[in-house]
Image (cartoon, grey):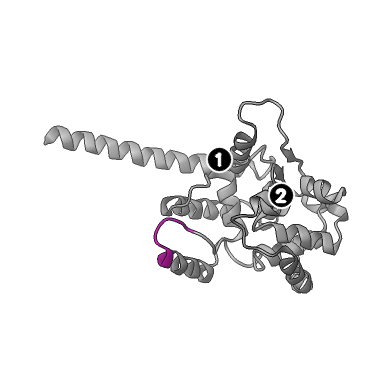
Amino acid sequence: MFWLKTHLSYFLKCVVFGIVAMQIYFVIQIALWSVLQPSSTAFQRAERWRLCNWHWSCAIESSWTPYQKISSNLKRAILVSEDDIFFQHHGVRLEDMQKAWERNQQKGTQAVRGGSTITQQLAKNLFLSAEKNYFRKAQELVITGLLELILSKQRLFEIYMNAVEWGEGIFGVGAAAQHYFVTTPAALSRDQAAALASALPAPKCFDKIKYCRKASIHFPTRQAFILENMDRIVLPRP
């Protein structure tokens, strides 16, 4: 019995140490991103592996665009589509999370879906796997708090727009603007911005029909909604 207690205590200490060390890693990495650009995200690396495996050449499109060189049309469109009070909240929207919790209780305990702010989406894309469970959701909330604490809202939004998926192997606004409209992020029109923002809930489906089997989104309707609501979004001054 003593042997079992000793080994159990050692195991628990290792688990706690591992969790604490992971949070310290997150803090250091996020702090570095206040001055450096993320080279890639966990989601991008997973997609690169899915699409390319061990191949050296791979059709992954990504290029960094500074915040000031991204059209205000796109910024407003994204906020309407994904998180219209992003610049007012502190990382989470409790009412939306409550609604998501209730939906998941009705569907069982397999998936956590909905209710995610831009910061939560960024936390997931930067560090976490696509696996859906409550432990991963809890870690997402911790990372969300760290992101909000360490980085400014503008910096969070800048990283999000440069990291988010916009199609198969297409990441960030620079690659998306070029891929869909052969233009730069600064030159995106209202219609183009609304189209790109409408893609965010199901970017692979927006890009290629073969990914639409699991998607239940009507992009033209969503684009029209975004266009109707863009003008009510007021962007903070840089």
Q: Residues within 10 Å of mark 1 (few under 14, many from 20)?
A: few
The image quadrant where one finds the C terminus is: bottom right
Q: Nearer the viewer, residue 136 or 202?
A: 202
Give the vertical position of 72 relative to 55 (above or below): below
Residue topped by disc 1: 28
Q: Residues within 10 Å of mark 2 (few under 14, many from 20)?
A: few
Measured as percent of width and height from the top left, residue 80 is found at 70, 67
Q: Is residue 33 visible?
A: yes
Give residue 208's mark.
2
Measured as percent of width and height from the top left, residue 127 is found at 55, 44
Measured as percent of width and height from the top left, residue 73 is found at 81, 62
Q: Main secondary structure of the magenta part?
A: loop
Residue 197, by quadrant, is bottom right
Measured as percent of width and height from the top left, residue 188 is found at 85, 56
Farthest left residue in view: 1
Name the kind of residue labelled 1 in the image. Answer: Ile
Residue 192, by quadrant, is bottom right
First-in-chain label (1 vs 2)? 1
Q: Nearer the viewer, mark 1 or mark 2?
A: 2
Q: Nearer the viewer, residue 210 or 68?
A: 210
- Which residue: 77% across, 74% down? 228
Task: Give the side of residue 219 with respect to residue 138, left or right.
Answer: right
The image quadrant where one finds the N terminus is: top left
- Which residue: 23% across, 38% down? 8
Name the kind of residue labelled 2 in the image. Answer: Lys
Contact? badges 1 and 2 (CB < 8 Å): no
Residues drawn in magenta: 105-112
Residue 12, by quadrant, is top left
